[in-house]
Image (cartoon, grey):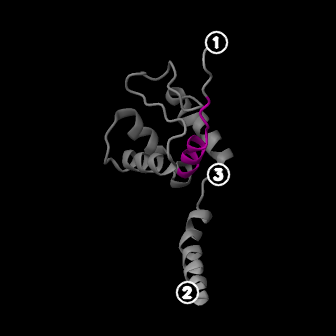
Amino acid sequence: MKLNFIIFFFLVLIFNIPNYLYAGDLLLGKEKAATACSGCHGMDGQTTSGGNSSLTPNITAQEKEYILAKLKDYKSGKINHPQMTLIAQMLSDEDIENVAEWYSNIKISIELPLE
């Protein structure tokens, strides 16, 4: 029983190592977001006046895997959008990882109005 647990533990560890090795860098993601994304999505992931609010989604606290998948789809042309395809094609795979890390780590805070 103990041996099975030990084997299971190490298998889980081994298969998750790539996730830790290729985790995005928050600071590099912030820098890249400032130049490539903030004009429409803002630094906090909230649509800005630079983006059309009806067409530009808020991406604050979106799951990292979702952001990665969307950016890769824009980059490959699987999803065609004039601005996003162009921007995504200018990003390296490392940039995409870092930007996804940045936006997925922003926390949403809500303040209730005073009565």
Q: How far across and how far down the image is residue 22, in percent?
A: 58, 61
Q: Nearer the viewer, residue 76 or 58?
A: 58
- The residue under the point 50% across, 46% down is 63
Q: Inspect the image, locate mark 3, and give the three-letter code of the amino acid beneath it.
A: Asp
Q: How far across and how far down the image is residue 18, in percent?
A: 56, 68
- The residue under the point 41% across, 46% down is 70
Q: Secondary structure at mark 2?
A: helix
Q: Secondary structure at mark 1?
A: loop
The residue pinned by badge 3 equals 25
Magenta segment, which residues?
Answer: 97-109
The answer to whether residue 66 is magenta is no
The residue pinned by badge 1 equals 114
The residue pinned by badge 2 equals 4
Mark 3 to mark 2: distance in Å? 35 Å
- The residue under the point 62% across, 22% down is 111
Q: Nearer the viewer, residue 30 or 17?
A: 17
Which numbered marker is on residue 14?
A: none
